[in-house]
Image (spheres, rainbow, N blue to C red):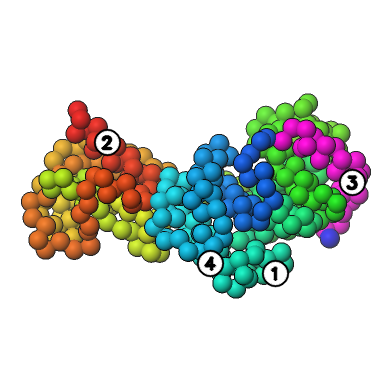
Amino acid sequence: MNESLHQKLEKVTVDQFQRDLIDWYEREKRDLPWRKSQDPYRVWVSEIMLQQTRVDTVIPYYQRFMEKFPTIEALANADEDDVLKAWEGLGYYSRARNLQAAVREVHESYNGVVPDNPKELGKLKGIGPYTKGAILSIAYNIPEPAVDGNVMRVLSRILSIWDDIAKPKTRKVFEEAVYYLISKEHPSSFNQALMELGAMVCTPTSPSCLLCPVREHCAAFSEGVQAELPVKTKAKANKKVQMAAVVLKKEDRYYIHKRPSKGLLANLWEFPNCETHPGIVTQKQQLAQFLQSEYKMDVQINELVGTIEHVFSHLTWHISVFVGVVIDDSNMEHLQSVTEQELENFAFPVSHQKIMQLAKEHQLG
């Protein structure tokens, strides 16, 4: 163990820290649907959904998902399009695909029982060190660290750790700290309490130190440096991409496209679109050329009905949205025509749900 970390940990009265933290959690914890059961499958689904997503956003998705796929067997046997439809709007769709792939492996290789062995659990698709620790500790009461951004923020302040939490190697420092501090009797409550503290009290900005149940153990509070921790270098600049999309109709039918099975928003459905570039050729002309070359479609693109901005972690789409009519689709390739009612069965990313909304508003207007 890193010597300076060891010295910092030795200053903590571990038993009292555990008691103060867990007692607060038992009194103050939020009533969340995934806390009603320690079923490892339910814990697993909730932890995957909560990655990079706010709790309030996740709650209705989690409830609907568990109604639709209440067991490992149900999710293992489900059609991927149904799973993506249930995930529609939650974002980071690779989470859903990896979850289903891993659940199928559990169903086939582990008789439908989520492994309680760290090595076996960690080999499943989409289960990194944090999710592994969360499942083992919350569902199986095994004292394993579950270190996410909340936990790193809390412990960087408690222990006055100045390592950059944006660097992958820093996670090891915090995992060592949790191994030392975790309650062996109540690891489930301990890990959830650390996460809850980070979410509700020890927040990124303006932490509520006077309400904190463990402030007497907090080195940053005693030194008055809680606002300076954790240390986190800024991510790379977000790339901006200009695009054009068109909602095409022929009588009562719409034209949609399935994205590739690899990469961003894999296997989701979308309206025809392309990246555009400034120059002599207008966006509308670039879009028309793309439709002809990519899909062999003869179309009339009408007016611009609005623009949409959609932000990913690494890039931002600025999408100009057009409506248009199909003149000839007899040689059409790679597109599917569906009725408005049938559109409901396909999983679209949020950006393309907004595109459809703009087109409908234009139609009504």
Residue designated by label 4: 104
Earlier residue among tags 2 and 3: 3
**How many discs appear?**
4
Sequence-wise first label, 3 or 1: 3
Reading the image, the residue beneath label 3 is 14
Which one is closest to the eye, mark 3 or mark 1? 1
Please indicate whether residue 105 sits to the left or right of residue 94 in the image. Answer: right
Between label 1 and label 4, give the one nearer the viewer.
4
Magenta stretch: dominant secondary structure: helix
Can you tell which quarter of the image residue 123 is in?
Answer: bottom right
Residue 351 image position (x, y, % from top left): 36, 44
Label 1: which residue?
119
For badge 4, the amino acid type reads Arg
**Residue reaching furthest to the top:** 210
**Amino acid type, callout 3:** Val
- Of callouts 3 and 4, which one flags the residue occurring earlier in the amino acid sequence? 3
Cβ–Cβ under 8 Å for marks 4 and 2: no
Front residue (pair 184, 42)? 42
User: In the structure shown, which secondary structural element does the residue marked by tag 2 occupy?
Assistant: helix
Looking at the rendering, the stretch of residues picked out in magenta corresponds to 2-29
Task: Give the amino acid at mark 1.
Answer: Lys
The answer to which of marks 1 and 4 sits earlier in the sequence is 4
- Front label number (3 vs 4): 4
The residue tagged 2 is: 358
Q: Determine the residue positioned at 24% across, 36% down.
A: 360
Task: State the residue in front, 52 or 109.
Answer: 109
Report the Cα–Cα distance between label 1 and label 2. 48 Å
Going 68% across and 66% down the picture, which residue do you hit? 115
